[in-house]
Image (cartoon, helix red, strand yellow):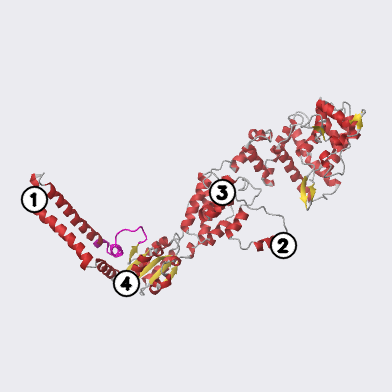
């Protein structure tokens, strides 16, 4: 995956016309490494105004060899003569070696003696010429100076105009730059020269050598700037991965870090590797994974923090003024640090976020979870979906946790497409055995129904009225009525009471409020459920054979309320008035009797079965003994 071609033909043609003009100048093409300078120069060279020019390109930054700078310049300005000169030197050496070898073996090969005279002459001449060349070069003849003079004459030849390009000038060592300045003085004003590099990284800037030679500094076209290239990254990801995401963070960071086209292509290769090769598409949140890949490549120190366990601080619920104050305090934060806090923040979206499934987001780690497509297929498959409703919460099932997280993070619109099937499975699972213990998935289905039936009523009714409570519960009852129509038997009123008690958090949730505690009370709660079913509960209690039917205990629990003995220290308003229902409680069969007391966490203590946990609420007398002792005896039978 790479960014698309960035056309700079118009700007290249304009620069080419400047170079080809009668005024011979020296230019410096400014751009960082990998910013597209070479591609831009190629477009300049191929432009019409420079068709009659020869480009002579010097690439001196490559690994050093023993060849002098003058020889390197000569080899590109006069390539044919340079090759001929090199071949001639190797020829002399070869002839000398061959001749010496032949002379050494002619005693073994007699027929070579007939050629002795010619071989001696040839070998001697080659050796002498090689020796003389080396002697003159070292003692009497400055070959490098001659080569530079020839090179300068070639470059200044007006009949065959040339453009000398020195690529990556900023990457040359200090000594090479100084040598080149001497050569440039020989051709300045007579030959068109283009230096290519990053002026900010030049050596000898303090001596201003280059400033004396450069006539004009040229910047790369805007299309090759980081801001424009960052948009090309977005286009490439959309085209290749076909996923929706918010590109603003990556585009902003790319521009802030002044990254290049080469950086962009490196980044895209990792994006493709992670999302396709490591199969993370639809298994990770796109914006978070793209950000983490960016850290890995361009901010490795921050990436190492993630690997070592760094997590963003949770967002608080302070008001806008307080948040503005916090923002002002954190203005000194770098852009990358601020984005680590915001982009990687925990959220309740699908797929699981970085905080929920950290290791999956690291580079080169395989995604071991299921994709959104796979999870959606599971939810829509009756056989696959139903098995999750029967899983015990204590089981160590990664698939179960994944399904839970997926359903919990579905939007209301997404959930409504599967709501009917989910509710059928939840209610039929509860109905499959007496007092079935619901798992978190069953509870989640009941909780999501409550949310969906509550929202429209809140827009049309007073939430604090009794009419609202009744309308809400009437609407909620549809979960049982719809499923019941497909079952061979009915879902009785007391069974429904049990489902409310065990599948919905009727009591609410404790939370710290200042130095004390408070309780959030849900829309369907212990008070309005008790009020809704009390009349029916009394009818069940008065019916013949009470206590011998499944779920009979629920009619008593509904009337007494759902508070239990642990409430005392926190909410001393009241404990259930067990004494008022003793006669009915004692009518319950052993199974219902135990279920009744379990609802209030009243049971034999684990540490000592002869002690009744919660017995303080049963201190009144029954049959000439504390009622707690009687209950303990029945529970221990």
Q: Which of the pair 538/611 is nearer the observer?
A: 611
Q: Earlier in the sequence, mark 3 or mark 2?
A: 3
Q: Earlier in the sequence, mark 3 or mark 4?
A: 4
Q: Earlier in the sequence, mark 1 or mark 2?
A: 1
Residue extending farthest left: 114
Residue 317 numbered tag: none
Mark 4 element type: helix
Mark 1 element type: helix
Magenta part of the chain:
60-81
Task: Identify the residue under disc 2.
Answer: 321
Name the quarter where the C terminus is drawn.
Answer: top right
Task: Identify the residue under disc 3.
Answer: 307
**Is 69 one of the magenta-colored residues?**
yes
Residue plotted at (64% across, 50% down): 346
Rounded to the nearest angstrom, the CA distance separating label 1 from label 4 is: 52 Å
Q: Which of the pair 80/627 is nearer the observer?
A: 627
Q: Which of the pair 522/518 is nearer the observer?
A: 518
**Is 122 one of the magenta-colored residues?**
no
On screen, residue 371 above or below 10: above
Q: Are marks 3 and 1 in contact (CB under 8 Å)?
A: no
Q: Is residue 396 visible?
A: yes
Disc nearest the viewer among 3 and 1 = 3
Q: Earlier in the sequence, mark 2 or mark 4?
A: 4
Residue 115 numbered tag: 1
On screen, residue 197 above or below 520: below
Residue 187 numbered tag: 4
Where is residue 579? Give x, y as percent.
90, 34
Where is residue 213? Give x, y as percent.
38, 73
Rounded to the nearest angstrom, the CA distance separating label 3 from label 4 is: 56 Å
């Amino acid at each position: 995956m790479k960014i698309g071609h960035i056309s700079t033909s118009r700007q290249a043609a304009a620069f080419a016309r400047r170079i080809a003009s009668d005024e011979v100048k020296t230019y410096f093409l400014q751009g960082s490494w990998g910013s597209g300078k070479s591609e831009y120069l190629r477009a300049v060279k191929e432009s019409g105004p420079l068709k009659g020019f020869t480009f002579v390109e010097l690439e001196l930054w490559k690994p050093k060899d023993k060849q002098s700078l003058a020889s390197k310049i000569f080899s590109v300005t006069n390539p044919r003569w340079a090759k001929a000169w090199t071949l001639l030197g190797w020829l002399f050496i070869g002839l000398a070696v061959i001749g010496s070898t032949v002379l050494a073996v002619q005693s073994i090969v007699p027929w070579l003696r007939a050629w002795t005279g010619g071989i001696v002459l040839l070998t001697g001449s080659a050796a002498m010429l090689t020796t003389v060349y080396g002697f003159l070069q070292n003692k009497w003849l400055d070959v490098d100076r001659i080569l530079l003079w020839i090179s300068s004459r070639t470059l200044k030849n007006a009949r065959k105009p040339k453009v000398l390009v020195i690529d990556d000038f900023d990457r040359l060592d200090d000594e090479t730059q100084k040598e080149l300045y001497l050569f440039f003085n020989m051709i300045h004003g007579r030959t068109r020269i283009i230096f290519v590099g990053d002026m900010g990284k030049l050596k000898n800037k303090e001596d201003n050598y280059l400033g004396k030679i450069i006539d004009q500094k040229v910047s790369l076209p805007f299309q090759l700037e980081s801001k424009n290239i960052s948009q090309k990254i977005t286009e490439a990801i959309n085209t290749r991965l076909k996923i929706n995401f918010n590109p603003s963070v990556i585009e902003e960071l790319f521009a802030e870090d002044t990254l290049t086209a080469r950086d962009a292509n490196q980044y895209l290769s990792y994006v493709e590797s992670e999302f396709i090769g490591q199969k993370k598409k639809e298994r990770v949140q796109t914006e978070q994974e793209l950000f983490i890949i960016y850290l890995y490549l361009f901010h490795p120190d921050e990436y190492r923090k993630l690997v070592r366990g760094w997590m963003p601080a949770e967002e608080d619920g302070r008001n806008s003024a307080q948040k503005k104050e916090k923002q002002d305090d954190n203005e000194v934060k770098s852009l990358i640090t601020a984005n680590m806090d915001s982009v990687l923040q925990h959220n309740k979206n699908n797929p699981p976020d970085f905080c929920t499934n950290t290791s999956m987001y690291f580079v080169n780690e395989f995604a071991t979870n299921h994709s959104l497509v796979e999870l959606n297929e599971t939810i829509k498959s009756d056989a696959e979906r139903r098995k999750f409703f029967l899983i015990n919460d204590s089981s160590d099932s990664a698939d179960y946790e994944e399904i839970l997280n997926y359903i919990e993070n579905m939007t209301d619109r997404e959930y409504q497409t599967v709501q009917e099937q989910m509710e059928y499975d939840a209610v039929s699972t509860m109905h499959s055995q007496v007092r079935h213990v619901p798992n978190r998935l069953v509870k989640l289905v009941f909780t999501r129904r409550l949310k969906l039936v509550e929202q429209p009523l809140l827009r049309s009714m007073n939430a604090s009225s009794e009419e609202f409570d009744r309308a809400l519960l009437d609407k909620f009852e549809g979960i049982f009525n719809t499923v019941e129509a497909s079952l061979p038997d009915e879902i009785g009123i007391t069974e429904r009471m049990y489902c409310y008690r065990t599948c919905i958090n009727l009591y609410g949730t404790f939370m710290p409020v200042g130095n004390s505690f408070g309780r959030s009370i849900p829309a369907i709660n212990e008070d309005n459920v008790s009020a809704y079913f009390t009349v029916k509960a009394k009818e069940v209690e008065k019916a013949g054979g009470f206590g011998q039917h499944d779920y009979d205990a629920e009619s008593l629990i509904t009337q007494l309320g759902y508070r239990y003995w642990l409430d005392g220290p926190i909410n001393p308003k009241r404990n259930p008035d067990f004494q008022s229902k003793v006669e009915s409680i004692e009518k319950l069969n052993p199974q219902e009797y135990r279920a009744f007391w379990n609802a209030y966490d009243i049971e034999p203590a684990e540490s000592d079965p002869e002690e009744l946990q919660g017995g303080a609420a049963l201190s009144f007398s029954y049959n000439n003994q504390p009622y707690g002792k009687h209950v303990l005896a029945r529970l221990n039978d």
